[in-house]
Image: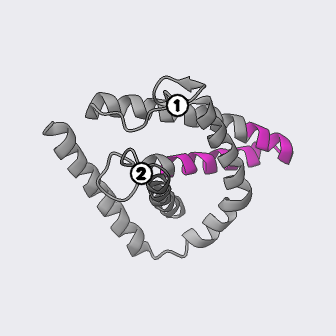
Amino acid sequence: MNYLNIFFFFSILGHLVENIFTTNYTSGILYGYWTPIYGVGIIIILLLNNFFKKKIKSKPLRYIFLFFSSFLLLCIIEYLSGYLIQQIFHKVFWNYKKHKFNIGLYTSLEMGLVWGVSSLIISIFIEPLCIKYSNKIPKFISYILLGLFILDILLTINNRVINF
């Protein structure tokens, strides 16, 4: 349940932050107030961090591996997500063409640095809080969110893909 709660918290937080700092587009492809790429990103960072904690005893070396693996993996996921969304929904939801070091429309080296630095901030400061508080969320809340999320995915597929 911890990972599910963390996924929803950061999907909603990411959606909120994007809507505050960007005005030229709507965050996410779903109808609900969440952007799953942020939830997926945080879960990947947490899994990578836990993997490196088991394999690498030196903290500085572990953080270097975490930074570069998050940088690379999350850039790949962001790129593939943007590409698939454009292919399925025939719409570009984010565009990094104006970034100096863009990699096509969907990601850039600047965003890779954001992902890498974020992974360090998350692993050092945020992960302990996530674990501490995510298991305090009642299970029925998690199940309600999961049900709403699945319903949102089904509605999105029906209204934006099938009825396209």
Residue 107, numbered circle: 1
Q: Amino acid at mark 1?
A: Thr
In the rendered image, residue 121 lying in the magenta stretch gets the answer no
Residue 35, numbered circle: 2
Q: Report x, y in % for residue 120.
A: 72, 49
Q: Report x, y in % for residue 97.
A: 49, 27
| Nearer-the-camera pick, 53 or 29 | 29
Q: Report x, y in % for residue 147.
A: 30, 62
Q: Secondary structure at mark 1?
A: strand
State whether residue 8 is above or below residue 144: above
At label 2, counting other C-alpha atoms closer than 10 Å, the crowd grade (few under 14, some 14-19, many 20 or more) is: many
Quadrant of the snapshot with the C terminus:
top left
- Residues shaded magenta: 39-65
At label 1, counting other C-alpha atoms closer than 10 Å, the crowd grade (few under 14, some 14-19, many 20 or more) is: many
| Nearer-the-camera pick, 88 or 47 | 88
Q: Report x, y in % for residue 82.
A: 41, 33
Taking the image as shown, residue 61 lies to the left or right of residue 89, namely right
